[in-house]
Every structure is written in C-alpha cells, then in structure tokens.
Amino acid sequence: MASEHASPNMTEYIKHHLHHWQVQMPGTEGQFWLINLDSVLIKLLAALLFVWYFIRVARRATSGVPGKVQCAIEMLVGFVDGMVRETFHGRSKIIAPLSLTIFVLVFMMNFMDMLPVDLLPWAWAGAHQMTGHDPAHAYLRVVPTADINTTFGMSITVFLLIQYVGLKHKGAVGFFKEFFTAPFGPWFAPFNLLLRVIEELVRPLSLSLRLFGNMYAGELIFILIAVLTLGASLTHFSTYLLGMGQFIAGFAWTAFHILIITLQAFIFMVLSIVYLSMAAEHH
Amino acid sequence: MIPNITLVIQGIVFFAVVWLVMKFIWPHIIAAIEERQAKIAEGLAAADRARQELADADSRVADEIRKARLEAVAIIDKASQQAGQIVDKARTDAIVEGTKQKAIAAAEIESMAHRAREELRTKVASLAVAGAEKILKREIDANAHKDLLDQLVSEI
C-alpha cells in the first residue's frame, strides 16, 4: 500500500489500521447499527475451524493408543476439565465445554495478532484493487479480540450464564433474596443491593476490558513497530538501520506475544469458571 | 500489489518467530505428547499382557486338573487291580493252607486210628490172656506162651 501512495502519512497509516471494515445494517442509521464485519467474519471462521477440527478429532478418537493430534487435544481437554473440577464445585454440564470453547476460541482470535500486521490488510487491499474498488477504503482489522464489541459480546454471554447458573442452583427465591441479604445481612438491604449490582456489573466489564486492552495494546505496538520503515526507500541508509530495529522489535514483541495471547485466553477462561462457581455457591 | 519493505520485514519476523517456536517450544509439546502416547501404549500393552497371562494361567490350571484327574483314575485302577491280586492271592493261599491243614488233620486222624487200633489190639491181647486165665483157672506164664499170644494178637 505504502509504495502506491506517494508518502503515506504515519497518522493516516495508523488510523487506517485501526479502522474496522464496517457495514451499516440495512434500513438503519447511526453508529450503533454499524457492524464490524471483519471481527464478525474472522470470529466466525475461527469458531467454524474450531468446531470442525474438534469434531473431526472426536469422531476419529480411539480408545487405543491415540495419535499425536488426538493426544494434544486430549491433553487440552484434560487440562480444562482439571481446571473446572478444581474450581467449580457445583454440578453443571455446561461449564467444562464452555471453558474449553472460551479458551480455544479466544486463543485462536488472539493468535491472529501473530500474523504480520500488514499481511491480511495488504491482501485485502489487493483484492479491492483487483475488483476495481479503491484500496484506500479497504479496511480490515484481523484481531477480533482487539475489538471491544467482540470481548463485550463474550463477557455479556458469560454474565448471562452467571445469572442463569445462580438461579438454577439457588432457586428464584434464594437468588433474589441474596441480592438484599448478602453479604451484610437483611438490615443493610440497600447497601447489599448496591454492592451486588456493582459486583455483577464489574465482572463482564473487567473480563472484556482486560482482554480488549491487552490485545488492542498489542496490536497498536505491532502497528507502531511497523511504522519504523513506513514508506521507506531502499536508497536511504537509515532504512537499513530502522529495518534492523523493526526486525528486532517485531521479533521480541511477537515472541513475547505468544505468552500474552495464551495467558489472556487462560485468564478469560479461569475467571469465567470462578464467576460461575461463585454464582453456584451459597453465600 | 508489490509488498513494501515493512511487510517484508514483518514476514521475516513471522518466520523468525516460527523458527523460535519450532526450536524451543514445539519440542516440549511433542515430548509431552509422545510421553503420553508411550504411557497409554504401555498401559494398554500391560493390560493385554495381563489378560494373556490370565488366560495362560487358566489353561495351565485346566491342564493340571485334567492331568490330576487322569492320574487319580490311574491310581484307582492300579489300586483295584492290586486289591484283586491281593484277594486272589489270599484265596489261593487259603486254599493251599486249607488243603495242607486237611492233609495234616487226615494224617493225624490216620495216626490216631492206627494208635487206637494198636491199643485195642494190645488190650484185646491182654483181655484174651485174662479170659484164658479165667478159663484155665491158672496163671499162664506170659513169657512161656508169648508165641501163642502174639499169634493170637495178629489174628485179631
């Protein structure tokens, strides 16, 4: 892209990178009805890949000596199941599969960060150009978890599940009574309610903002590293120095990011289990 | 659609990280997987082996039982044979002994009869002498008439 535009402006470049591929819902107006199509599609692709691959492995699973792929997935499932058993003491069939899905899906979405930050947008711009569109308007953000809509979508789902598990384990009466009686007893009912509301609302907020913040910052740093050689020409000596700098910084940050993407997926999963477990327990 | 230098360097970074993963992370994952595979294979093999051993032991036990039964049958056969032999032997022994005893008894009877006859003969002789004495009203010198007496005895 950069070579095709005379001198790409740094701010423009960053802005372009942070712009979603958006479509307006038909018959609507306003920001709220914009859909971040890139996040949705990439998350959908990741989900399909996850479901397809795991079903394939599960279908071929043998009770004899497992193959390497089955072994890896067994270890992953065993690991998640162990976490759930350790943390969640209620009985619920949904928790372990939910945790596995959260972990794998968040990891896959985070993993998009590992790809060269310009690769897919460049290909996307190329596709636009070939179909006769303006490549300057080819917006694509490849990391769905760096989109706050994605992370909020997941954390709100978890929030609803928390309420559902709480209702199921305590019954409607116990569940709503707890709003007013815990943790300070019935004499402090208003405080209890206030505290409870804050507690419940903070959970999805912290879950989604933690993941979003980490991934957004990570993506931004990748973009900033890319800026080092933005619009550079091979005839300048400084290009080689900055290129080296870009390589070293990119390598270090990408390697470090392996840890971050795994950790963030893990944290999202563990916190979901913990919240669900707390919802199932009586105060 | 020519990639710029930024993208090229990003690609190099990507492959460098792939190399890093291959070199330092992948071996650990593969090692863990292979260890798990080996453990599962080992466990399955052990189970198979145990099952095979159990089957072997079962067949061995059945063999032993069959052998013991045959042996027992043989022993019983031999014992009954021996018992038969013993009974036979006892029977023949008893017959032999019986005939022997019978022979002894017969001989004894014979000798007793002989003795009785002898005794009777002498008694008859003396009785004849006494009778003759009484008839002759005088004593007969036994020695003097010994020849006569002996002749009498032998005639009885």
Image (spheres, rainbow, N blue to C red):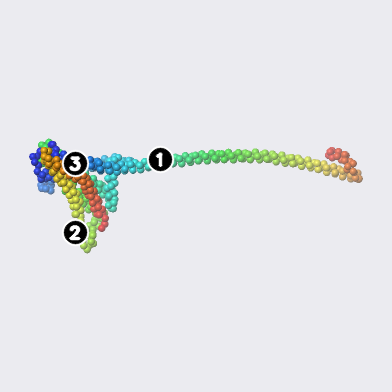
Q: Position of residue A149 (x, y in %)?
A: 16, 48
Is any atom of residue B92 visible in this view? yes
Say few, some or many: other residues with alpha carbon within 10 Å of mark 3 (under 14 / 14 to 19 / 20 or more): many
Q: Which residue is mark 3?
A: B13
User: In the drawing, does residue A135 fall left or right of residue B35?
Assistant: left
* CA separation in Å, label 1 and label 3: 56 Å
Q: Position of residue A155 (x, y in %)?
A: 20, 50
Query: Which amino acid is tagged 1?
Result: Gln
Residue B10 occupies which quadrant of the picture?
Answer: top left
Q: Position of residue A260 (x, y in %)?
A: 21, 47
The answer to whether marks 3 and 2 mark residues whose Cβ atoms lie closer than 8 Å is no
* CA separation in Å, label 3 and label 2: 50 Å
* Chain letter, disc 1 residue: B
- Are the residues under marks 2 and 1 on the same chain? no
Q: Nearer the viewer, mark 3 or mark 2?
A: 3
User: In the drawing, does residue A276 fall left or right of residue A230?
Assistant: right
Residue drawn at point x = 8 percent, y = 41 percent = A7
Q: Earlier in the sequence, mark 1 or mark 3?
A: 3
The local secondary structure at tag 3 comes to helix
Q: Nearer the viewer, residue B30 or A66?
A: B30
Residue at far bottom of view: A187
Q: Which residue is mark 2?
A: A194
Say few, some or many: other residues with alpha carbon within 10 Å of mark 1 (under 14 / 14 to 19 / 20 or more): few
Query: Which amino acid is tagged 3?
Result: Val
Q: Position of residue A66 (x, y in %)?
A: 31, 41
Q: Which mark is residue B52?
A: 1
Residue A140 occupies which quadrant of the picture?
Answer: top left
Q: Nearer the viewer, residue A103 or A168?
A: A103
Q: Is residue A42 above or below residue A278?
A: above
- Are the residues under marks 1 and 3 on the same chain? yes
